[in-house]
């Protein structure tokens, strides 16, 4: 069995997540496409205390860029497509044949929908008819007012569930977003025509995609990185066994880390040659580097929890803390607030895992200035030692 050290796994993971040189890559359609393809997805989230998660995740890698350029890539050129990979994500267009298999199987693999669909088929049919006739529509377009209250068959919850089902099963696609609200259209009018990969090939594709994104993976990572779709344990284990038997994957022993680890055979050289990262950036809580929190703890010694759902008196670090990545290590967390009207980026708190030196404080100050430029903030307000570096 091949033996690798934990730092080699960490270095390749950062490389696959395009964080070897944070803030240092030129933003382009090609570079964004490569990142999303390598990571397996770019997570979307509605929390906007600093910036939407997908915009912020790309800033972490590319530095300030034009958000409208990303919107054009997604909703104009369709270089990226919205689907459920690890929660709601943007996925690479080249991965659409695999995700189309998930769409095609969604109804068959989700028995929970059967009971809901039976009484709600008229709602599903009417939503499809409306979108076919009227074009892209948002969930809010399916709420009618009757005596000041919503009423009729356009009750919001059934319509919302129907839209989600139609999206997940591939009948609808996200055409665009307005104020972050999805607008749906028929998939045939939005997505390129592709054929789903064979059903029997999907588990191996999924395991291969995960191993590529992680560089090397603990057995538990395989189910907790790309969490969609739900697969029976036997499917994933069977696919991994076939990859091991064919020689496409191999088992590793990672020094200093317990459990079984695996990697693609083609990544062995990359594990041996991955270089140490340099530079400083901030990560959104929804960054793919953090999708599996136990992995971050195993590789970086960093125990992270988002506290937006924690009552304020019980928060330890802050409402929406951003992990600090410095020279390939997760070294602390920063609690920011973007005051848009005042054009001010406020640092409400910063916590380091150990004492911060000049290099870390200077790097963090540079990252904050870059973030302020991206957000259109003209001032960065901070207290404590960090203030003198800004």
Image: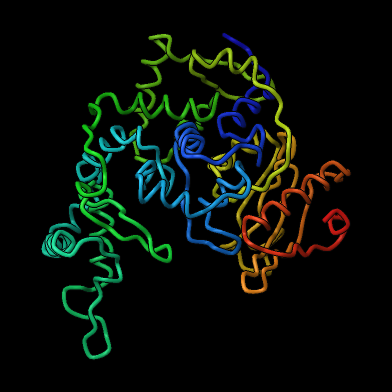
In the image, taking residue 372 as reference, residue 140 lies left or right, namely left
Q: Quadrant of residue 185?
A: bottom left
Question: Where is residue 169 shown, x and y percent of the image?
Answer: 23, 47
Q: Which quadrant does the N terminus fall into? A: top right
In the image, taking residue 93 as reference, residue 328 lies left or right, namely right
Relative depth, front residue between 295 and 78: 78
Seen in the picture, residue 290 relative to 383 is either above or below; the reply is above
State how many labels appear: 0
Seen in the picture, residue 289 relative to 387 is either above or below; the reply is above
Asked which colour scheme the image uses, the reply is rainbow
Question: Where is residue 243 shown, x and y percent of the image?
Answer: 39, 16
Residue 70 in view:
yes
Residue 348 in view:
no
Question: Where is residue 362 shown, x and y percent of the image?
Answer: 83, 46
Q: Residue at x 20, y 61 (%)?
A: 135
Question: Where is residue 65 shown, x and y percent of the image?
Answer: 57, 49
Q: Which quadrant does the C terminus fall into? A: bottom right
Q: Residue at x 25, y 54 (%)?
A: 165
Q: Residue at x 56, y 34 (%)?
A: 17
């Amino acid at each position: 069995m091949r033996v690798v050290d934990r730092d080699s796994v960490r270095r390749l993971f950062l490389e696959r997540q395009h964080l070897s040189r944070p803030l240092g890559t030129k933003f382009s359609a090609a570079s964004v496409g490569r990142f999303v393809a390598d990571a397996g997805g770019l997570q979307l989230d509605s929390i906007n205390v600093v910036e939407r998660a997908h915009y912020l995740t790309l800033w972490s890698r590319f530095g300030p860029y034009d958000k409208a350029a990303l919107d054009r890539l997604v909703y104009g050129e369709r270089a990226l497509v919205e689907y459920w990979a690890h929660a709601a994500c943007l996925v690479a267009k080249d991965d659409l044949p695999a995700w189309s298999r998930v769409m095609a199987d969604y109804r068959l693999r989700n028995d929970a929908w059967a009971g809901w669909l039976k009484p709600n088929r008229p709602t599903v049919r009417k939503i499809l008819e409306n979108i076919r006739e009227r074009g892209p529509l948002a969930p809010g377009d399916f709420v009618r007012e009757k005596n000041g209250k919503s009423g009729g068959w356009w009750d919001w919850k059934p319509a919302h569930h129907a839209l989600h089902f139609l999206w997940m099963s591939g009948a609808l696609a996200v055409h665009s977003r307005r104020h972050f609200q999805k607008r749906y259209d028929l998939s045939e009018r939005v997505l390129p025509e592709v054929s789903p990969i064979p059903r029997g090939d999907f588990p191996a594709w999924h395991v291969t995609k995960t191993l590529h994104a992680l560089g090397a993976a603990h057995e538990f990572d395989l189910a907790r990185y790309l969490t969609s779709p739900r697969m029976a344990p036997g499917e994933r284990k069977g696919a991994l066994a076939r990859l091991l038997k064919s020689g496409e994957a191999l088992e590793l022993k990672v020094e200093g880390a317990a459990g079984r680890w695996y990697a693609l055979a083609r990544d062995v050289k990359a594990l041996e040659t991955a270089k140490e990262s340099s530079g400083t950036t901030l990560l959104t809580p929804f960054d793919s580097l953090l999708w599996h929190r136990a992995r971050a703890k195993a590789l970086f010694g960093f125990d992270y929890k988002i506290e937006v759902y924690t009552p304020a008196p019980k928060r330890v670090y802050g409402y929406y803390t951003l992990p600090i990545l410095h020279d390939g290590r997760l070294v602390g967390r920063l609690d920011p607030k973007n005051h848009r009207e005042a054009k001010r980026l406020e640092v409400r708190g910063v916590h380091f895992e150990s004492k911060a030196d000049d290099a870390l404080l200077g790097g963090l100050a540079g990252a904050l200035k870059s973030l302020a430029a991206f957000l259109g903030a003209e001032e960065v307000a901070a207290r404590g030692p960090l203030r003198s570096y800004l």
